[in-house]
Amino acid sequence: MSNVTYDYMEKYIRELIPAHEGILTELESYAENNKVPIIHKEVANFLELMISITKPRAILELGTAIGYSSVLMAKCSDDIEKIDTIERDEKMILLAEENINKAGLQDKIKVLKGDCLEVLEGLEGKYDLVFIDAGKGHYNVFHPHCLRLLSKGGIIIADNVLYKGMVASRELVIRRKITIVKRMKKYIDMITKDENLITSIIPMGDGIAMMKRRDD
Ligand SMILES: C[S@@+](CC[C@H](N)C(=O)[O-])C[C@H]1O[C@@H](n2cnc3c(N)ncnc32)[C@H](O)[C@@H]1O
């Protein structure tokens, strides 16, 4: 139960989305069998659509895991020149690099090793799409860097912002997740109240936030 949308709605929508093939199917099975959290099917579908509309050349991803979403994004469009994806877990880094090589995408996708905040602090240049999918309790601190690294007209998509519904309903909050929920609420406040941004919160998957600078 996602507590973000109705189960029957999620099931219905998932069944409408065509299945992937090849390496993406392999990675989906690996993730399921090994309990590696990867983006939900409808979020993958949404990313594919957004990439097709916005045609980003450079993408920054926070949270690589086994490389599923970065491979998925790289396969969306020939316009993509590079995807930099940040991961701190050694085991995930090895698996991701293996999978990226297997997909033949090693020239496009680079795994930046380390904690997101530390890597972000050292990054320069601009990205047309920033996809945030790591460190739910730290989106607040990642945010200024994501904005600094965002190209003119670029978009930020953040996953898990409704965090199993806990962000929207006190009754759903699990005690040991209180700090993450509080921080996520602050993040949502920050991005929805910032007059320089236009932001949409979408109850899909575990909740998505999408934003761009209003005047770009
Ligand atoms: C939800 S998974 C990413 C899934 C991936 N985007 C996909 O859909 O294929 C989140 C990943 O972020 C990593 N992570 C969590 N916090 C991090 C941090 N502060 N810095 C770097 N990596 C982090 C975890 O090790 C985990 O592999």
Image (tube, grey):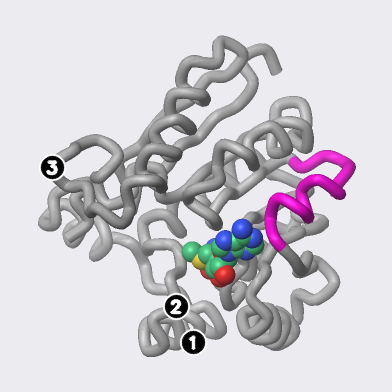
Secondary structure category for the residue under label 1: helix
Image coords of residue 49 (percent x, y): 50, 48
Mark 1 closeness class: few <14, some 14–19, many ≥20 residues within 10 Å? some
Per the model, the C-alpha gap separating discs 2 and 1 is 13 Å
Which amino acid, mark 3? Answer: Glu
Dot in front, 3 or 1: 3
Q: Which residue is mark 2?
A: 36
Q: Residue at (46%, 49%) from the top-left corner?
A: 159
Image coords of residue 31 (percent x, y): 44, 81
Image coords of residue 115 (percent x, y): 70, 60
Image check: 84 left or right of 167?
A: right
> Which stretch is magenta?
115-127
Q: Under 8 Å from ligand 1: the CB of mark 2? A: yes
Per the model, the C-alpha gap separating discs 2 and 3 is 27 Å
Quarter of the image that includes the N terminus: bottom left
Location of residue 87 by image quarter: bottom right
Quarter of the image that includes the C terminus: top right
Circles 2 and 1, Cβ within 8 Å, touching? The answer is no
Mark 3 closeness class: few <14, some 14–19, many ≥20 residues within 10 Å? few
For residue 208: magenta?
no
Secondary structure category for the residue under label 2: loop
Disc marking residue 171: 3
Disc marking residue 26: 1
Q: Earlier in the sequence, mark 3 or mark 1?
A: 1
Foreground pick, 109 / 193? 193
